[in-house]
């Protein structure tokens, strides 16, 4: 009997786990749990990024749909106006880059300009006209340009301008009234910017660049790169305004209109925008360069109802 009990005790002792085996098992289990946690954590982060990107894409598409529907309505007035007060059917103001090289400029934007402005005439109903437009300005004050930090333009907000009044094109004073309606759009003075800002609404925050490029009937871009500056076509002028030798204006008067306008802009997601605003000024350009892949791009060539004759 004693030998039988001893044999059972020894078999039980041999069937048990040693401390080393328990430690190895617990270590392996911990590694598996940590690996699963890391996998689920990355999956959750990817899901949140996807949801945030979807929200930004939806917001960008909504804003872009509004822009497309609005620009498609642009139409020539058929009124030329006097030289001192011309009537512009559509105009594009193209600003130069704040910095031609270095991080945060061409590395991020890949364009020959950072922010453009687009203004156009809209028919409200028979012989009743208004002016509208799109421009990028400071996120805190629409009358101020996008701030330049360490020689590089920062991120701005896209605004839509709507003229506070309409003009009824009839009678001898119609040309002058239309000219005054578009004079604030051509001028880039502080007074003109304040008037535009007071009649503008926010469309989209976190805009890295905004470009508007008119195209002719032959598919040729109507800008200073493709056409010699200060060249006057039929009711189309591409020139440098006085006092702004590096800023180009492309204007359409009379019955002239481009066949299409290509609109393109890039937007930072909300989380990236918050991080961008929180970093010091001397690191903002580097942040844009590092997070260039997060910029969401929207681009479309919008066909207009009235092409260049």
Image (tube, rainbow, N blue to C red):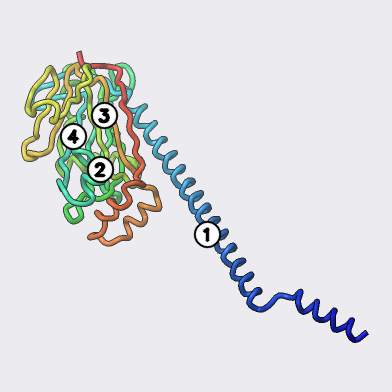
Q: Mark 3 points at which residue?
A: 131
Residue 144 visible? The answer is no
Residue assigned mark 2: 109
Q: Is mark 2 on a helix, strand or loop?
A: helix
- Location of residue 28 with respect to 74 vertically, above or below: below
Q: Which of marks 1 and 3 is nearer the N terminus?
A: 1
Report the residue that reaches farthest toward the right: 1
Residue drawn at the location 82% of the way across and 81% of the way down: 9
Q: Are marks 2 and 3 in contact (CB under 8 Å)?
A: no
Residue sitting nearer the eye, 15 or 4: 4
Q: Distance between the residues labelled 4 and 2?
A: 18 Å
Contact between marks 3 and 4 (CB within 8 A): the answer is no
Which dot, 3 or 4, sits closer to the camera?
4
In this rendering, the label closer to the viewer, 4 or 1: 1
Q: Mark 4 points at which residue?
A: 93
Marks 1 and 2, how far apart in space? 35 Å
Estimate the x, y position of residue 49 in percent, counting from the top left. Answer: 46, 49
**Circle 1 residue:** 38
When the figure is inspected, residue 44 is found, relative to residue 295, above or below; the finding is below
Q: Where is residue 126 in the image (x, y as percent from the top left)?
A: 31, 16
Separation of disc 3 and disc 4 at Cα? 15 Å
């Amino acid at each position: 009997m004693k030998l039988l009990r001893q044999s059972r005790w020894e078999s039980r002792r041999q069937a048990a786990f040693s401390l080393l085996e328990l430690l190895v098992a617990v270590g392996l289990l911990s590694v598996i749990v940590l690996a699963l946690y890391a996998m689920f954590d990355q999956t959750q982060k990817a899901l949140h990024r996807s949801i945030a990107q979807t929200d930004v894409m939806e917001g960008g598409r909504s804003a872009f749909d509004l822009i497309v529907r609005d620009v498609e309505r642009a139409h020539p007035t058929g009124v030329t106006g006097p030289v001192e007060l011309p009537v512009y059917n559509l105009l594009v103001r193209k600003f130069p880059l704040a910095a031609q090289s270095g991080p945060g400029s061409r590395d991020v934007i890949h364009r020959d300009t950072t922010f453009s402005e687009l203004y156009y005439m809209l028919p409200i109903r028979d012989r009743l006209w208004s002016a509208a437009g799109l421009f990028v300005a400071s996120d805190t004050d629409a009358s101020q340009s996008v701030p330049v930090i360490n020689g590089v333009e920062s991120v701005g907000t896209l605004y839509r301008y709507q003229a506070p009044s309409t003009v009824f094109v009839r009678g001898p004073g119609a040309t002058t009234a239309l000219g005054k309606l578009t004079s604030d759009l051509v001028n880039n003075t502080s007074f003109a910017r304040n008037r535009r800002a007071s009649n503008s609404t926010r469309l989209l925050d976190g805009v890295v660049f905004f470009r508007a490029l008119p195209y002719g009937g032959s598919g040729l871009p109507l800008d200073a790169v493709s056409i010699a500056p200060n060249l006057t076509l039929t009711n189309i002028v591409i020139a440098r305004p006085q006092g702004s030798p590096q800023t180009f204006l492309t204007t359409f008067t009379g019955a002239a209109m481009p066949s299409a306008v290509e609109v393109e802009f890039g937007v930072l997601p909300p989380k990236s925008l918050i991080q961008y605003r929180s970093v010091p000024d001397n690191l903002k350009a580097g942040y844009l360069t590092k997070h260039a892949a997060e910029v969401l791009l929207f681009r479309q060539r919008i066909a207009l109802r009235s092409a260049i004759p």
